[in-house]
Amino acid sequence: MTERIARFNELTPSTLPFVEGRIEGHKERKNYSIVGPGVAEDSQQSVKISKSHGYNLGAVSANPKNGSGLHSHTTAEVFLIYSGSWRFYWGADGKNEIILSKGDIISMPTNMFRGFENAGDEEGLIFVVLGNDDPGIITWVPNVLIKAKETGLALLDDNSLIDLKENEIPPNRKLLEPISNETLLKFDNYRIDEIEKFICRFKNQTNHEINLNNGIKLIQIIGSGFSNKNYNAIIDHDTGFNLSILKGKQGLIEDLVFDKPTILFSQKGNWKIKIKEEQININSKDTFSVPLNTKVNISIEDNEDCFLNCVSKAS
């Protein structure tokens, strides 16, 4: 089972994951690829669990006033705030923004420029779920590529990262040019009230709790599937995966079976996962990839409410 476990304190982050990694406001952060490679432009990015799941799980930590520049994805991007306060901003000009805090979740629409920044006064951490085994490439707003080139970093036309201070452009490649203003206008924008429907705030999650068994409750965030049953989701957004949260202090749920690739990662607490005669302990920030079509028992023993995130490929 060891190949199915990702201990957060054993992960190797990239400190230069993307082309804007030397720009002020973007350079004091770390990028983690936990399940799948994600969209990191760093060819040396370490991936802990490489087995295909139909989605990717990563994490980003950043110092105050640091984060990501404006970019767009062709597949789903769902953020789960583990610690700190984060400013999410969107649109080609980045003028729309919202502040999210610990426990909040946002599912970003595709074909829309978005960025994020640690809005707190200490290092913060967010988890990110990306759709599909291959989540595609990143499209940056023109200004990001222009500023990045001034720092010596650029993208080649195959979207690979190159340090122009240390390397020559390969003879069969050329630099990726910023998108045109005409192309820029083809990307979507949303009002703040329109983005709100893609957000589930931690304070509102208790309104959607479903009692499962023996002290464990379910909160269905995205998609309808959990184990072999269907539930109504809080966020109505087709991401290609289901996102559920198990909540409990003292509880046990037995004989869960997952017939689609599924991972469990702890938001809070030491969760015990038993499969046959083997027990796996998942502490906060740790991730476990669940074997398919196998009975799984999950339990928690704590004095406070604990939370276990569950992501599974949608049918």
Image (cartoon, helix red, strand yellow):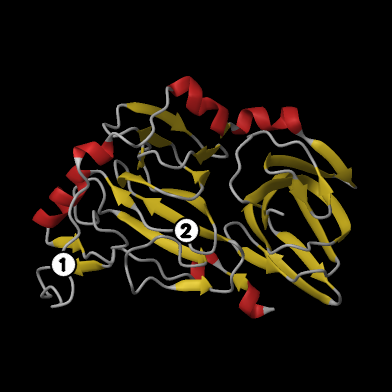
- The residue at 36%/34% (across/down) is 90
Type of residue at label 2? Answer: Pro
- Residue 178 vertical position relative to residue 294 in the rendered view, above or below: above
> Is label 1 in a helix, a strand or a loop?
loop
Q: Amino acid at mark 1?
A: Lys
What is the count of numbered marks? 2
Q: Please name the residue that numbered disc 1 is placed on.
A: 174
Point out residue 200 in the picture as x, y percentages from the top left corner: 60, 33
- Can you tell which of label 2 and label 1 is closer to the viewer? 1
Depicted 4 relative to depicted 304: above or below: below
Say which residue appears at 49% left-offset and 20% top-offset: 193
Q: Is residue 252 left or right of residue 42?
A: right
Q: Along the horizontal axis of the image, is 5 left or right of 254?
A: left
Where's residue 263, x and y in %? Answer: 66, 61
Please identify the quadrant where the C terminus is shown.
Answer: bottom right
Label 2 neighbourhood size at 10 Å, few (<14), some (14-19), many (20+)?
A: many
Task: Report which residue position mark 2 lands on.
Answer: 135
Q: Are marks 2 and 1 in contact (CB under 8 Å)?
A: no
Number of residues whose C-alpha sits closer than 10 Å to that of mark 1, classed few (under 14), some (14–19) or many (20 or more): few
**Side of 112 where 2 appears, left or right:** right
In three-dimensional space, the C-alpha distance between marks 2 and 1, rounded to whole angstroms, equals: 23 Å
The residue that appears at 17% across and 76% down in the rendered structure is: 172
Secondary structure of the residue carrying numbered label 2: loop
| Near-viewer residue (224 or 46) | 224
Q: Position of residue 45 (x, y in %)?
A: 38, 70
Q: Quadrant of the N terminus?
A: bottom right
